Image (cartoon, rainbow, N blue to C red):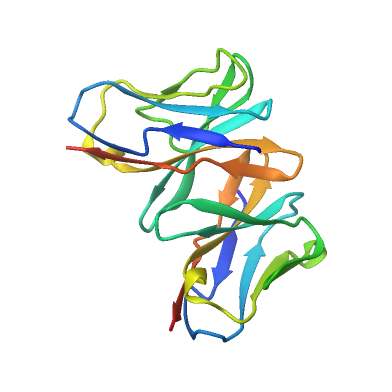
Amino acid sequence: EAQVTQNPRYLITVTGKKLTVTCSQNMNHEYMSWYRQDPGLGLRQIYYSMNVEVTDKGDVPEGYKVSRKEKRNFPLILESPSPNQTSLYFCASRHRDGYTFGSGTRLTVV
Amino acid sequence: GIQVEQSPPDLILQEGANSTLRCNFSDSVNNLQWFHQNPWGQLINLFYIPSGTKQNGRLSATTVATERYSLLYISSSQTTDSGVYFCAVKYGQNFVFGPGTRLSVLP
């Protein structure tokens, strides 16, 4: 079964403590992306990757990093999280029939 | 960039009623999907429908790409249909979401 797996599902952290949200897909898709969802602002793209070692900024990349060392994994890195990065995060991969999203990671930065 | 609008923003139904949700987009697209975000926040893919009509049980969708809109039909609604329904379109390397329609189905 096609799957996009994110971990963790929930995370509470403190300002400035580096964290990584992992994302993996088992479908050999080339394209992967990260989104954040905020009340009143909807879902916005953070970063995307067209293939291994190819990444690019989306609409709201500030404060985030990504890497794509292998096709199946696309981690989202917050080097120094701040409270305005409290949000619901989604990873997605793209295929012939559209996009598949992970279950989401609810991040709270205090 | 492309604009994606959805209507109505909120909808309250009695269980068993039918409804139609609309998605308008401002430019040509070659990928449109409908999602249901359940109360736990998960985005469930309902339809990949860049054009034409598809049906899946009580749900069906129609996209008229030349007129830049898509419709999602929910028949015989159930309380488990509650949540937010999003349409999203591929535009360049972005996947742009509409603001959603919040559906509440009352028992």
Residue A8 lies, with reference to residue A17, above or below; the image says below
Residue B51: x and y, percent? Answer: 80, 59
Instruction: Return the residue nearer the eye: B9 or B53.
Output: B53
Residue A16: x and y, percent? Answer: 20, 24
What's the residue at 66%, 37% (across, down)?
A: A94
**Rendering quarter of residue A7:** top left
Residue A98 lies, with reference to residue B64, above or below; the image says above
Instruction: Return the residue nearer the eye: A102 or A65.
Output: A102
What's the residue at 67%, 73% (across, down)?
A: B58
Residue B25: x and y, percent? Answer: 66, 61
Q: From the viewer's perspective, is B32 left or right of B54?
A: left
Instruction: Return the residue nearer the eye: B56 or A79.
Output: B56
**Rendering quarter of residue B7:** bottom right
| Quadrant where the image shows the C terminus of chain B | bottom left
What's the residue at 49%, 61% (across, down)?
A: B99
Q: From the viewer's perspective, is A105 left or right of B46?
A: left
Residue A86 lies, with reference to residue A15, above or below; the image says below
Residue B8: x and y, percent? Answer: 52, 76
Q: From the viewer's perspective, is B95 left or right of A41?
A: right
Tally the marks: 0
